[in-house]
Amino acid sequence: MGLIPKLMNPRNFTYDITESGCHILNVPMKKRNGRPKISITINGKQKELSYLKYLYEQTNGITPKGSIVINTCNRKDCININHAKTISNSKFISQNMAKPIEYYIDENNCHVVISHYTSDTDRPIIRRYGKQKNMARYILEQKLGRDILPGMVAMHLCDNGKCINPNHIIEGTNSDNVNDMIQKGRNHIGNHHIPQKLTTEIVKEIRKEYAALITKYATIYSISNRTVGNIIQRKIWKHILE
């Protein structure tokens, strides 16, 4: 248990420390959107602000104009200033208005992404702060509460590149990843590269028939193949549920 510095009144607040290092208040306190709030007097006027921001500014100074203080641990009720950072309002809005991640859970408990497009290596891509990022790396960083260390990669224990189950992704070196690939026999091409019940011939047939289906509807309705593909993948006309 830790002790928080005194505020404008003589009362001290105490908090509990979780396994992940979060400081969680153990006394009742006013909250807004799950974040503890306090009222302080500035220039004779009472102002309400985030308790985390108050504590953060005691150490780091006033937050720059146009910026806010947020939690890096993804716990809104955490008041550990080591779990806080400043971010511009525009970046915060961009992050929170981002396209939601949708996935289904397969028989191996993999969370297979269906909401975002994939790279040339069939890895889901997410956009954050105006930049594209490998979704597995993004999920791992959220899990770790920090950026992936230099020289390290996001390794899939399940060997499914589209999986974003945090329990299936760990931090490792490139050597770890290569050794894991060799041990599991994924360093070959063709049928050996596909652990599912598919073969190279089946994959080719699926792709051929899918392409033919797209061309068929594009011709019937006088639209482009790309538009038909986007409709099927729910990239457009998303409000049509059936």
Image (cartoon, grey):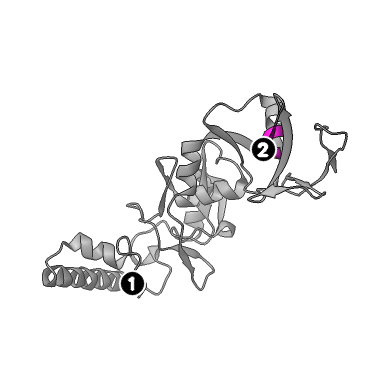
Q: Secondary structure at mark 1?
A: loop
* Side of 14 relative to 96 (left or right): right
Residue holding disc 2: 49
- Give the residues in magenta: 46-54
Q: Which secondary structure lies at badge 2?
A: strand
* Residue found farthest to the front: 44
Most foreground residue, 114 or 38: 38
Three-letter residue code for mark 1: Thr
Q: Is residue 108 above or below residue 95?
A: below
Q: Amino acid at mark 2?
A: Leu
Classify residue 20 as left or right of residue 110: right
In the rendered image, which quarter contains the N terminus? top right
Image quarter in which the C terminus is found: bottom left
Q: Residue at x 83, y 41 (%)?
A: 13
Residue 192 position, x and y percent, is 39, 65
Q: In the picture, residue 38 is in which quadrant? A: top right
Going from the N terminus, do you reach mark 1 or mark 2 first?
Answer: 2
Left or right, residue 48 beside residue 180: right
Number of the label disc, if any, that sits on residue 27: none
Q: Which x, y percent locates residue 21?
A: 74, 44
Task: Kindly identify the residue that appears in the image at 46 percent across and 51 percent down.
Answer: 135
Residue bearing mark 1: 199
Position of 235 with respect to 175 (left or right) is left
Q: Residue at x 47, y 55 (%)?
A: 182
- Residue 188 versus residue 145: which sits nearer the camera? 145
Compute the Cα span from label 1 to label 2: 59 Å
